[in-house]
Amino acid sequence: MNSTGGTTLLAAIETPSVEYAALSPMLIVFGAGVVGVLVEAFAPRRLRYPLQLTLSLGALVVAFAALVTVAIAQTEDGANGQVAMSGAVVLDRPTLYLQGLLLVVAVVAVGFMAERRLERVVAPVTMRTLAGAGGGDEPSTRTVNGGGIDADMFTPSGASVPNTDAEFEATRAGAVTTEVFPLSLLAVGGMMLFPACGDLLTMFVALEVFSLPLYLLCGLARRRRLISQEASLKYFLLGAFSSAFFLFGAAFVYGASGSLNLSTIGASLTTVTDTGGDTTLALIGLALLAVGLLFKVGAVPFHSWIPDVYQGAPTPVTAFMAAATKVAAFGALLRVFYVGFGALRDQWEPALWAVAIASMVIASVMAVTQNDIKRMLAYSSIAHAGFILLGLIAFDDAGLGATLFYLAAYAFTTLGAFATVAVIREPDTDAATSARRAAVQGTATPVRNPHLSGREATDLTQWSGLGRRYPLVGAMFAVYLLSFAGIPLTSGFIAKFDVFAAAAGAGGGVLVVVGVVSSAIAAYVYIKIIVAMFFDDVPVEAAPHVVRPSVLTTSGIALCTLITAVLGIFPQPLLDLADSAAAFLT
């Protein structure tokens, strides 16, 4: 503060500019999430489900339309986007590509979350009937109970202790956990922001914004409630631990460069390396940052949460996490290494080699030992994280473009695979059958198990002969498995070929050899499932059956199957789009 002639001159404070038009896709999603919270607070219970579903799908579609408009404006005449929010957000070509991919994935995932035909539960009853009081309408009510009603795949009372009377009464009361819709929208908004962050502080905020809703969603499964809550707790504890590593790494990087902005960090480290300065502090910070980011992509040795969480979480949430979280996390990982720490490539490249090799080999070998389909797909996700890292290690435009294409191919394949797993069900258990019969007959036997449909048939032995009984479902799931294995005429083959070519061109021939061997090991797992579906005999008793889902899930599975096949036959349009998006704004 200076004082001249009695007049106090205050230093001018430059107010940050907010580019609302450029940020509109994210603002629409976040705004819809906030409105969804208000709907939960004030809307009548019977209106919440249709309101939340309409709001969620509508907001995602409108956000995608806004993103297309922004992308056209930001990339016309060869431009590469802009920096917004005083450098906190970067809207360049990779950001716009990844945000568009996230929105399309989110539309399919939210439709899957809204599925209400795969579960059958006891019908709601009045408290008077539940207490066993007499009444003229009691027999008809019990008959309705025996038939059951359609329900979603989320517990009606997330705050209740699993498998207690309180949870059972919530089921009988017809409660619906529609909170999953605003939670999902907030997670999508955070995922859209994550790869767009221009500084580490904003990146940490985005990391927490999309992680916290996922922690809650993982614990809301209607079936296997204890496993679901265990998965939520594991994910929360390990996720919080990894976030602390990320934040501590940002502090070290600030100490090394004097800034949290990735472009400034990159320029500072380039100057230090050119002058032969000390980069020890920056390397420590990068190592800690990498722990937080590699945890989110599920790479070895930060992968231990993935099998348990993917198995225990509600299958729609598993599908959403497996597809969308990997896209967002790899987008942030690419930006950190390409923009902020490119000058230290010689130091971090050997470490990423080790992580990629361990992810591909260990995950492929561990997948062979699994008998649960969801755990097999979880280890497959870890192996694919290793394959995608090959594109990052290539560290050029070809590697970046290959990574962007791989993320799109993998996202739709894994989303469709988990959605298909959800429609394959065990037959009704004897306990559920006897309980239903007791309700229909009007006996005094209490209905203790509220679930009238079978659980998901995730054990490999339960899939014997599935392809014979349901050829279309078996064929679609086989398409996903062949894509995971990298068989020609599927999107997985093109994606693997692209990242292998990029890695080989950058001197990573050893990585390619390891990747091919790991793919061969993992192929055994996928072929084993196909053999069980089409060549094993159908069990005489307890044969699994396919429950026909609603149009939302059916169209989502069909779309994922179509994209998986089309990208294997006509991949060039998406390859060109990914290559044109392979340029960070620095």
Image (cartoon, grey):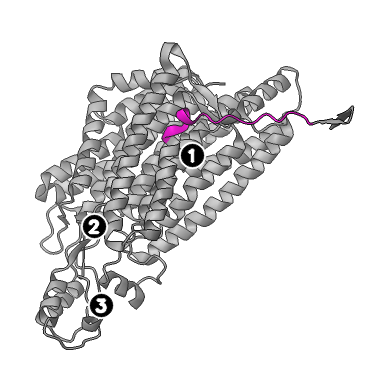
Disc 2 crowd rating (10 Å Cα; few below 14, some 14-19, many 20+) is many
The residue that appears at 54% across and 31% down in the rendered structure is 18
Q: Which residues are magenta?
A: 10-25
Question: Given this view, does label 1 or label 2 mark the residue nearer the observer?
Answer: 2
Q: CA distance from mark 2 to mark 3?
A: 22 Å
Between residues 120 and 12, which one lies in front from this camera angle? 12
Q: CA distance from mark 3 to mark 1?
A: 47 Å
Q: Secondary structure at mark 2?
A: loop
Tell me which amino acid carries mark 3: Arg
Q: How far from the left and from the top, in percent, is residue 575?
A: 34, 21
Where residue 349 is drawn, which disc sits there?
A: none
Where residue 448 is drawn, which disc sits there?
A: 3
Disc 1 crowd rating (10 Å Cα; few below 14, some 14-19, many 20+) is some
Question: Given this view, does label 2 or label 3 mark the residue nearer the observer?
Answer: 3
Q: Is residue 162 above or below residue 72?
A: below
- Tell me where residue 16 sits by quadrant: top right
Check disc 2 and report the residue beneath it: 457
The residue that appears at 41% across and 34% down in the rendered structure is 25
Q: Is residue 47 above or below residue 75?
A: below
Q: Is residue 416 above or below residue 538?
A: above
